[in-house]
Image (tube, rainbow, N blue to C red):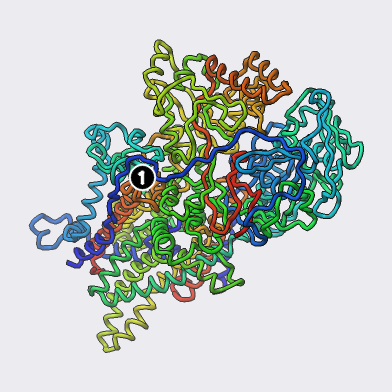
Amino acid sequence: MLRFIIKRVLVALLTLAAIDVITFGVFFAVPSSPAAVMCSKNCDEARLARVNAALGLDKPKLDQFIDFNKGLVFGRDFKVGDKADHCPAPCLGYSFRTSEAVTKVLGRGLPITVSIVIGAFILWMIVGVSLGVYSALHRGTFADKIAIGLSLVGASMPVYFFALILLGIFVFSLKFFEFPHFVSITENPLLWAKGLILPWLALTFVQAAGYARYSRSQMLETLSEDYIRTARAIGLPKRTVHMKHALRAAITPVITLAGLDLGVFLGGVAITETIFGMHGIGWQSVNAVFDLNLPVVMGTVLIAAFFVVVSNTVVDVLYAFIDPRVKLS
Amino acid sequence: MDKPVQPVTASGGTGAAAVDIVDNLTVAPEAERLPEAIREIVGRSPSQLAWMRLKRDRTGMISFGVLVFFVLLALAAPLIQWLYGQGGPEVGHSELLDLRGRPLGSAGGVSGDHWLGLRPERGQDVFLQLVFGIRTSLGIAVVAQIVATTIGVVIGVIAGYARGWVDRVLSWFIDVMLAFPFFLFALAIIPTIYLKLANASGVAAWKKIMVIVLIFVIFGWLYTARIVRGQVISLREREYVEAARAAGAGVGHILFKQILPNIWAPILITFSLGVPAIITAEAALAIFGIGISDGDGISDLGKLVAHSVRWMPNWEYVPAAAWLPGLTIFGIVLAFNLFGDSLRDALDPKSER
Amino acid sequence: MRRTLRIATVGLAAIGLFAAACSKNTGEDPGKGQDKKLDAKLVYVDDAKGPAPEIPGAKKGGILTALGSADFDHFFPQATYRGDAIMVGGQLALRTLTNYYEKDGKLQLMGDIATTTGKQEDGCKKWTYTLREGIKFEDGTPVTSKNIAQGVSVSFEELSADGPQYIQRWLKGATDYKGPWTTKGQLAPGITTPDDKTIVFELSEAHCDFPLAAALPTTVPVILDKMDPSKPDSLESPLSTGPYKIKSYTRGERLEFERNSNWDAKTDPLRHNYPDGFVFDWTATDPALTTKRIVADAGADKTAIQWDNVPSEALPDVEKSADAQKRVVEGETVFSLFINMNTQIITDVDIRRAMIYATNQQSILQIIGGEKAGKPSTTLVPPVTPGHKKFDVYKKPLTGDVDKAKQLLQGKQLKPFIYCYRAGGTRPQTAAAMKEAFARAGIELVLKELDRTTYYNIVGKKNTDCALIPGGWGQDYSDNSTYLGVLASPEEANRDGSNNNAYLDVPAVGAKLKELGAMPDRAAAAPLYGDLEEQIFKDYAPWIPLYYDYSYSLIGSSVGGVFLSGTWGSPSLQNAYVK
């Protein structure tokens, strides 16, 4: 077991390294220069060169790559003007536009994204899976049909469409809710939740629909398995059969997918954040793209990829605990 | 994008669900070689059975009809424009707007000339915009998905069949690519590629489209590859494959006669799930201004949706322009989802829906 | 059977709510807004004394929040050129030698740190200012004439290259001066400070508009010892001399001001300190959303000021709310929008004339939102700039005159022209509209989209490939030498980073501009600028007039004293208070 875990972690590290190289390659092959961004209107060649030198951008790409990765592990000093700004490890780069380390910028956005995603995740899992399982157990009933219909709508609807409808109806027309405003959970838990209701609802509707469909199909498949038939045939009560045996088998792949989804979402839910004016890392990265603030974009890509790799690894390891076949393969 | 394309199977797994589908298709292929009359008694081949099940499924057939309708609409666009007689889709009928850019008349400028009214600000005909927008978006999505699926099948088959380190390296590479946040990446990379492609006159519209297709291909092949790989792995352990190998069949024969014919099911399903995902993703990118720009003179459903989003809060001024683009995408995605469901049901007799 | 029902369930949900907009749009003006005009006449007031006149109804307390989408590029005064940045700095924290006071739609220039607008001698070549008593920096240090000299000197540094360059160009003997840090502490030549309260400027040429240039942040006093060019942060938090000082500044996100206890109202004829502080929130990146929030006027938004204009898709939100219409802040501004025709590429003046005729101004206005965003123009210089002459050389209907254009183009060989524009906003749509309008007359445009970083580098050079370059300009101060004087200047055309994007390089025009710029009587010079502009249009037709800018935004119900400053194009905080 331990060997499996170690192997998996090593692969994860290798993956992260590859992502590091690819990201660096892609973003630093970019012609858009950060120095030009700092220069705005009256930028001549000489000035551009000076700014480039100050930011270390005139060094060969390989050196820049090494510097970047050293900074990732040990932290790094950036020379802005003649000043040295220390960027603590893990240093994801320096945002020239706002004169601060990328980690500092993203540190402001991460709590917001995490709040949105974790909250919505809990909601959509509870709603989606229970709906799906219930649907499967009561197949063919009216309730089932409604559920299928709703989840089909939700799964086909783009998130921004639904988010705008929510805003239009509940905030601007009916004035049920105030416009979402983020309050840190440490400041005021109640306001924190209140401000996040709409983003949670928007994400939950779309995601729960998908999970309802998936749970339902998994549950149905499991229910038609031979061993379930056997269990019922030998007289086990329906409830036991369903909850103890079928559910556990059906849920496992759903949980697997959920874990991976979580990793992806933690990387930023740009559209939801933008529509609701929440300045999480998704919003920050989109804005960074428009500001041509490439270090921040790069930092976000790396963080998002990190979350995905970690969740992948965790899910694989957990799966190994649950399903003995995996260990042996 | 917020809603990631959900693969049919989970990562790294053995493609459990898909395997089950194919499991049931491997009725002895020899049945196909028996004379017609005896076949009637022996039973139908798996494909025929699937096709029969599909035909019986009314929802599936209706959604298929809807899809065919959209495709025909897209193909016939230039003809429709000629018959409609209002000029091209991007023509701005500014004389039919008031000074604030809102269409004159009722319901956003609906009239005999402009069946669905006009778009605000520049006054393009909504009907034509939808028709040509569907053409562009569907075209991009289908082309991208075809290329992505092809590449995915090739890589998936290689990975699944070759096993060993080839498989491990390819799978690992797929994992690496899958870890990248697609939306962010596209958002950041596409404008930069445009910059690189720009010459004195800017970037030609067709080049922009090629870049978009490329990005979708680069990320699209991953899912197909993974599923195909899972399929191939399970298939190569089948008795008839082993038998073929024992009989001395070469790799080519095994691949083309035994394996490929049996993986078309998941391929088809991935294809039908991939196209709507691309359309939605393209619209999401357009909302952030990435992709085809207003200045390019090409209608695009994604761009249309992005504009409609701005006017939805005050849709009464331009009801069609505000609602139809989003509903159209919803409709296309829904049709693909319903059809994909029906396809899955038809191909997998075990799950009685 | 189950499937069919499933479709029905889905179908019902999928039918769009098509309650048709039954009301008919006949194109009448939905809002009965009155256009606020800006009085072009500038009044010099030389006996102003602090404190500034009390604003009736104003009371102390509260914090006002401005919601905007674009942070100031700099907050370093000598490098600031953006209208709203100069205004905010000047009204809250950064006093200059002279400054403006807007009262009842009229603009007054008076001494700010100085007691008067300046005493001139030697035919406007020598300017003397006496500083008021009791002005201190936020740390309690008294402001002396030396600090002002240091401020002006810093404006020569490379760091300030983005800021206004007038005084730097005018000072006697300063052509080679590069700034106090580059020259190891030496201050700018041409400035003398006989004592702590007196400062004298000597110019190489006569400039009777010096008091106007002195209102620009070039003359913001600094303490050189406290500034460290190797620490950019120290530059971004200049020491305040006004009623507020910077509390915190997170670039691109938030700028906060709090009270400055070392400001004495008795020394200041221009400013008040009613609110406890100001916040600039730059994360409000969607102006339509901001409009909706302020229309809804809930909670914290009651003390909000919309910094960007109401975009066209959000105008209906204001039209639908009688309450919001009472909280509109609007007016003409100093900006005019036009399209430069690169005279170096489009060398045939008849083609340029044809382009003016072919342009469909109506379609451009429709894109930006109509008369609440701009008024159709027939000149380059807007009404608020002194010397604006209301001429119409190329008379045409708002949708253009395609026949006249075709007439002018008869027999000519046309090649495609490159139209360069920046991505984002309404610009791509404007480009598409221009292309369509020109196509009617047989002119082919190739649209080239550029991104923010490379845009100025590409269009700002005389040898650019761009034939048509959209442009906009507003006076730097109330004198046409900062408008026509820049946009038609041969000197400017030959400079990297030129603002004369029509690249009009006519020596005769340059000479006439110099002549007008040297006239001591600015009031007499003004109408002559108008005549010159009309002549340029007739002879050279270098610009396609589009519209004069109009500003339209909202404030919350608890915001008092805020009006639209046409001079700066933003809501003025001069009399702001919280109700």
Q: Which of B79 and C356 is in front in this view?
A: C356
Seen in the image, is C33 located left or right of residue A148?
A: right
Q: Quadrant of the image for the C terminus of chain C?
A: bottom right
Q: Which residue is drawn at 44% across and 30% down?
A: C361
Quarter holding residue A225: bottom left
In the drawing, does residue A210 fall left or right of residue A285?
left
**Seen from this angle, which residue lies furthest left?**
B37
Could you say where residue C5 lies in the image, as x and y percent from the top left? 20, 65
Task: Name the residue carrying label 1.
Answer: B301
Mark 1, other Cα within 10 Å: few <14 / some 14–19 / many ≥20: many
C401 left or right of C79?
A: left
**Number of numbered discs present?**
1
Where, by quadrant of the figure, is residue B125 drawn?
A: top left
Front in this rendered view, residue C96 or C307: C96
Report helix, strand or loop for mark 1: helix
Say which quadrant the N terminus of chain C sits in. Answer: bottom left
Q: In this view, does B221 lie to the left or right of C452?
A: left
Q: Is residue C534 above or below residue C14?
A: above
Label 1 resides on the chain identified as B
Work out whether residue C28 can be spotted.
yes
Residue placed at 37% from the left, 76% from the top?
A249
Rendered location of residue C525, percent (x, y): 67, 22
| Residue type pointed to by label 1 | Leu
**On screen, residue B312 above or below A34:** below
Residue B192 shows in this picture: no
